Image (spheres, helix red, strand yellow):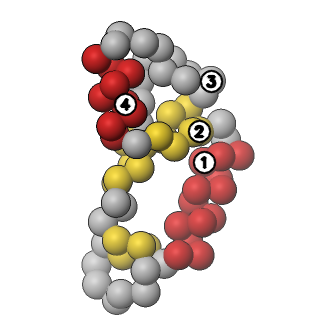
Amino acid sequence: MALLGLNLTARGGAPILMYHSVGFNPIFFTVKPDDFKKQMDWLHINGYEAISLNALVNIISRREELP
């Protein structure tokens, strides 16, 4: 699962967050659902907007500004 975080107050870049797994699997690189929600809430409160990788590709190919 890959998510993109875009800071609405900063132009000129798009930080990319990648989550290998969200769940209760005890393997390395797994984020528990409650922790994932807390992280997403923090990003939202701090002005980030999640978009898909496909949406970012479309924005770049059309030479549009990031949200």
Residue 12 in which image quadrant: top left
Q: Earlier in the sequence, mark 1 or mark 2?
A: 1
Q: Is 28 located above or below residue 42 in the figure?
A: below
Q: Are marks 4 and 3 in contact (CB under 8 Å)?
A: no
Q: Is 57 located above or below residue 60 in the figure?
A: below
The residues tagged by marks 2 and 3 sit, at their Cα atoms, a distance apart of 8 Å
Q: Are marks 1 and 4 in contact (CB under 8 Å)?
A: no
The residues tagged by marks 1 and 4 sit, at their Cα atoms, a distance apart of 18 Å
Q: Which residue is mark 4?
A: 56
- Residue in front for this viewpoint, 14 or 51: 51
Q: Are marks 3 and 1 in contact (CB under 8 Å)?
A: no
Q: Earlier in the sequence, mark 2 or mark 3?
A: 3
Q: Amino acid at mark 2?
A: Tyr
Label 1: how many Cα within 10 Å (few below 14, some 14–19, many 20+): some
Total marks in image: 4
Q: Earlier in the sequence, mark 4 or mark 3?
A: 3
Residue 14, given in percent of the width and then of the height, sits at 41, 30
Give the left or right position of residue 46, taking residue 4 as reference: right
**Residue situated furthest right in the rendering:** 45
Q: Amino acid at mark 4?
A: Leu
Q: Earlier in the sequence, mark 2 or mark 4?
A: 2
Q: Which residue is mark 3?
A: 9
The residues tagged by marks 1 and 2 sit, at their Cα atoms, a distance apart of 5 Å
Q: The residue tagged with tag 1: helix, strand or loop? A: helix
Residue 22 in which image quadrant: bottom left
Q: Amino acid at mark 1?
A: Leu
Residue in view at x 71 percent, y 46 percent: 45
Q: Which residue is mark 2?
A: 48
Label 3: how many Cα within 10 Å (few below 14, some 14–19, many 20+): few
Q: Is 55 located above or below residue 60 in the figure?
A: below
